[in-house]
Image (cartoon, rainbow, N blue to C red):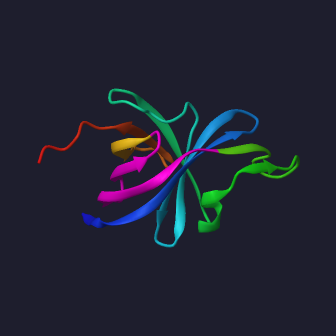
Amino acid sequence: MKIKKEIKNRFVVQEHHAKRLHYDFRLEMNGVLASWVAPKGMPVESGIKRLAVKVEDHDLDYIDFEGEIEEGSYGAGKVFIWDSGVYTMEEDEKDRIVIELEGRKLTGRYALIKMKDKEKEWLLFKTLQKKN
């Protein structure tokens, strides 16, 4: 298990009005934005589990992007920043990531757990706070 608790990296959630409304969840990791698509949005309270599909990493300069991706381009549609902030890594394993988010809307401990036998599907949820 890799732990980087003292380091704060950035995150962003972009509301993406493409063919279907979805949310792009991006974590600054290893010089890129590790990215997942959350088709039904981000869980804001414990007990809600959402599908998050792993997609290609994005360049770091995409973290501030808001605007319109023109018709005919991949991901065409309007993009808005829904939330952003920083996070601390609690666990970083091949099939499990646990982070503490500090955003305007999303705060607290979140987990991404890779679904068994699925190449790109992860489960995203807000966890109960870790007891000290």
Residue drawn at (71%, 45%), measured in percent from left and top? 79
Residue 130, image quadrant: top left
Q: Which residues are magenta?
A: 81-105
Q: Position of residue 103 (x, y in %)?
A: 44, 47
The residue at 51%/73% (across/down) is 31
Q: Is residue 131 left or right of residue 12?
A: left
Q: In the figure, 94 relative to 101: above or below?
A: below
The outermost residue toward the left is 132
The answer to whether one can see residue 84 in this image is yes
Count of numbered circles on the image: 0
Measured as percent of width and height from the top left, residue 109 is found at 31, 44
Per the picture, the main secondary structure of the magenta-coloured stretch is strand
In the picture, measured across the screen, residue 21 lies left or right of residue 120, that is: right
Position of the N terminus, as image quadrant, is bottom left
Residue 108: x, y in percent? 33, 43
- Residue at the spot 38% in from the left edge and 49% down from the top edge: 101
